Image: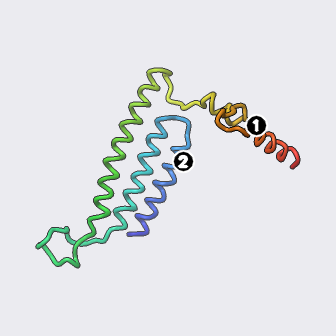
Amino acid sequence: MTILLAATAAALFSIGTYLVLQRKLSRIIIGLALLTHGGNVLLITSGRRGNPPIVGSAARSTFSDPVPQALALTTIVITFAVTALLLALAYRSWLLTHDDEVEDDVGDRDVARDRHLDPDVADQQEAMTETHAEEASE
């Protein structure tokens, strides 16, 4: 049973990671949900089976571990809040662009192409020219 739950968690993690790396915002939201479901499966699997941890109902050695259950409940609440925020952002994006694709930012492209110089870094131009010289020599 533990191997089946571990395989289920691995499948949820792999599918969730694949979806998070997509360009559509709806797939990113579903991917994050799958990632957190995989985490919940691992948390619940890590706990010890037993009787409910109610004092006086059974011997203490037969109690189940309540910590993974508490962590899973906390994860569910945080996931709900993050999902609500992402759905609100997706709805706003849909209203503005009528598409849920996440596009590249022009500023990010400039930074990637070494066109952006940070005014707070004094020797950035020298470091960039050294990097380009090393790349050209290889």
Kind of element beneath mark 2? helix
Up the image or down, 45 lies above or below 128; here it is: below
Q: Residue at x 70, y 38 (%)?
A: 122
Q: Residue at x 48, y 40 (%)?
A: 28
Q: Quadrant of residue 109?
A: top right
Q: Which mark is residue 18?
A: 2
Quadrant (top left/top right/bottom left/bottom right) for the N terminus = bottom left
Up the image or down, 103 lies above or below 58; here it is: above
Describe residue 11's horizontal placement relative to residue 52 as left or right. right
Kind of element beneath mark 1? helix
Q: Give how far across and how far down residue 7 sits, in percent.
A: 46, 63
* Residue that lies at the very extreme toward the right in this rendered image: 137
Q: Nearer the viewer, mark 1 or mark 2?
A: 1
Q: Which mark is residue 125?
A: 1
Q: Residue at x 44, y 30 (%)?
A: 90
Describe residue 136's horizontal placement relative to residue 13 as left or right. right
Residue type pointed to by label 1: Gln
Crowd class of label 2 (few under 14; some 14 to 19; many from 20; radius 10 Å): few
* Residue that lies at the very extreme toward the left in this rendered image: 56
Crowd class of label 1 (few under 14; some 14 to 19; many from 20; radius 10 Å): some
